[in-house]
Amino acid sequence: MPAANLSILNEIYDIILERKSTPVENSYVCSLLNHRKGIDKILEKVGEETIETILAVKGDKKEEIIYETADLLFHLLVMLAAKGVSLEDISEELEKRRK
């Protein structure tokens, strides 16, 4: 099985960082990053998408699993960007664990 090209995660993360440093009106990412609830709003979305992903897996519907996992990954990227954690940080941790 060929390796997945996950460069899209880097692209999305870069866009999130751009929105963080240069807010854009009517941007969903900016609405999360600048919400009055702060990080709690982002964590609510991560929790919601986690539950929806679990339910999709329990329902055994591949298309729903893919859709909900994409939502979960997106919101995790927003959370990481909000807290100043890079994908490189995550990659390095995974490399350490692989050894």
Image (spheres, rainbow, N blue to C red):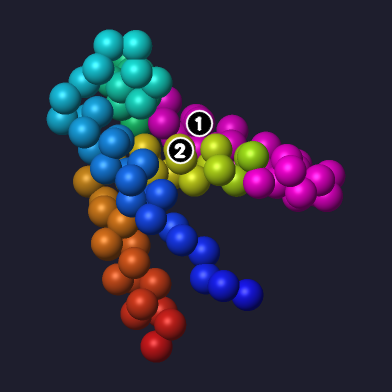
Q: Badge 1 is on which residue?
A: 45
Disc 1: CA contacts within 10 A as few (<14), some (14-19) or many (>=20): some
Image vertical order of residue 57 relative to residue 98, above or below:
above
Q: Which residue occupies the foreground of this view, 47 or 29?
A: 29
Q: Which residue is mark 2?
A: 75
Which element is circle 1 on? helix
**66 left or right of 81?**
right
Identify the residue shown where x is 42% and y is 25%: 41
Query: With respect to residue 24, does 91 lie above or below?
Result: below
Residue furthest out toward the front: 2
- Residue 7 x/y as whole percent: 38, 55
- Residue 6 pos. (x, y %): 44, 58
In the rendered view, would you say 49 is above or below 66?
A: above
The N terminus appears in which quarter of the rendering?
A: bottom right
Does 18 lie within the magenta span?
A: no
Please give the name of the residue rendered at 30% of the width and 26% of the height, measured from the top-left corner.
33
Q: Please state which amino acid type lies under the numbered disc 1.
A: Lys
Q: Position of residue 84 (x, y in %)?
A: 22, 46
User: Secondary structure under badge 2?
Assistant: helix
